[in-house]
Image (cartoon, coloured by chain):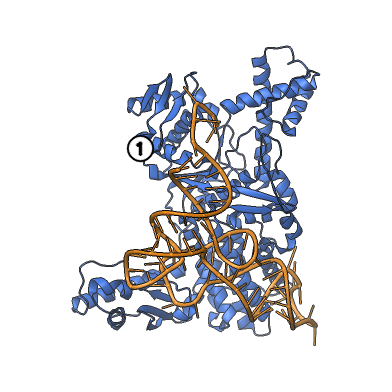
Amino acid sequence: MYWRRVEKDENSHPPVRGLFIHMSSVVEEIRSGLEKALADSLQVSRDSGQIRLDTLPEITVEVPREKGHGDFAANLALLLAKPARMAPRRAAEILVQNFAGGTWVERVEIAGPGFINFYLKPGWIYLALPMVISEGGSYGSVNIGQGRKVQVEFVSANPTGLLHMGNARGAALGDSIAAILIFAGYHVTREFYINDAGNQIENFGLSLEARYLQLNGQDIPVPEDGYHGEDIVASCISFREKYGDSYTNVGAGERRSALVAFALAEKLKFIKKVLSDFGVEYDTWFSEQSLHDSGAVLETMEFLKDQGCTYEKEGALWFKATDFGADKDEVLIRSNGLSTYFAADIAYHRNKFLRGFEWIIDIWGADHHGHVPRMKAAVQALGYDPAALEVIIMQLVRLYKGGEIVRMSKRSGQFVTLEELIEEVGRDAARYFFVMRSSDSHLDFDLDLARAETNENPVYYIQYAHARICSILRQLNEQGGQMPDPENVDFSLLKEEYELALARKLADFPGEVAAAATGLAPQRIARYLHELAGLLHSFYNSHRVITQEQDLSAARLVLVEATRITLENGLGLLAINAPERM
RNA sequence: GCGCCUGUAGCUCAGGGGAUAGAGCGCCGGCCUCCGGAGCCGGAAGCGCAGGUUCGAUUCCUGCCAGGCGCACCA
């Protein structure tokens, strides 16, 4: 392999982390069973000539939004109306007539314009409870990924500064998406691309040099478009502690590269530490410079030339992005002989494909969305499927303080860092806030609110549910009781509305994981957890778990333990703690 | 001018071709001799505008309006 890892994280996840024994979800099993039974019914209806049609509509059974519409519902009769040329309700009647119920179906009703609603015997909901207990930490995992290799590249901040709110959002999103994909059966690599080459590094060097010389009494201004942050000064101070003024009298090139190497290493170490504090551990830190050093960039340029995807104009080498649907062509190698960032990025993505990733997920800020069409064009020119590259465009974060927008800019040196954020609102709250909304929604982060309302944070609501359950389990322990074996529990004693709602919600978890993975949507997990916690709180306020009725207590103990496990698993996907006490 | 994202409750946001659109905060009114009140129960309040596709649109399409972000031989 010609690429190299800059640094392998010693705490990285074991490679087998993505491999879970797959057990199907109760909801999914019954849902697909109903679909099959419905398909059989349609077949019977056609064979008997009651329904005539040429093309089969898609048969789907869904969980209706309204509880009053049954446990599951199908819209097949409505879809049949046109091709079968009959009234939807009539079609529904025929389908119901020919429908063979199976184990759990109690009754089937036709409702509204022709929906077929399935009402199941209550017992089906209880099936999830022993499953949660026996699967434990892997409850909710599904195997839709089947071990496919996926890479999630995120944050990839310029290593020349500190991490700001946009990076923080990317970190929370990317890490949670990676965790969810692992739980959904993918083999996932978390990667950070280090932009340690090019113009900004030049600029970084000039800024460092100016600050260094200033510290040594020379009046050299920081370039106007340079880095003006205090952190640059700090780097120069540590540099000076180590090397003194020995670099004042050497050539500018030598001075700058020494400063850059020193400061970059320092910055990267810090970035890595802050991300680690935020709960993010990368598998790979990938250096852009390594692509230049290894010749991968030039090699890729040659490849594109050979493919006839380039041309020269005004002394520069251009990529014919317009041949692949982009708006305009792009420069790969400038007339001064230096390659562009885009050229390195093409080499980088080629490298990703060469490493065997079947699904490549990049998380970028909205300010880079214009880059998407040309990157996809490049992937295609390289001979790969552009659909294998999925770019999540994350809308920018707006920070509010004192009711006013805080301008964030690296160059001006004014921004609230991830480090400060963790200090102010805590890792758990910050992680939750960043993933509770979808990536393509603008994010207003009110610092005052986050600080002032720490106790009102939804994440505490969820954590409190977990802590409450732990408290019950402590009670159980103090009274000398123990968690019953689900095999010996009569779940039919759970008849209360909140008990059934809670068990039903637990059964939904694998489906939520699958949906979150498919849609790359961690906010679904955040919302699910909030709803689950709400049901637990409602249940808790209405019913006692530990009572004199032993059989009922046993059933409720399994119910809350299953809830605890599910909360813990879900919070784990978001890297949020599940505390036993608060 | 062109392109991408977004307009859902007073505020911040979920949801999403179906049958009664959700949550938090804020507001109003209730609940602790009881496993943790960081909790629970109840109430008021909403799909930017106009067309189109569809049996059915808040959801998909088009236009308009509003906000954000892009449109370098920068990254």
Query: How many discs appear?
Result: 1
Please say if A405 is above or below A302.
below
- Report whether A580 appears left or right of A295: right
Residue for point 43% across, 40% down: A373
Quarter of image, res A200: top right
Residue designated by label 1: A324
Residue A545, image x, y percentages = 66, 78
Amino acid type at mark 1: Phe
Residue at mark 1: chain: A
Residue for point 46% across, 63% down: A23
Chain in blue colour: A
Residue A414, image x, y percentages = 71, 39
Quarter of image, res A28: bottom left
Please say if A124 is above or below A234.
below
Chain in orange colour: B
Q: Secondary structure at mark 1?
A: helix
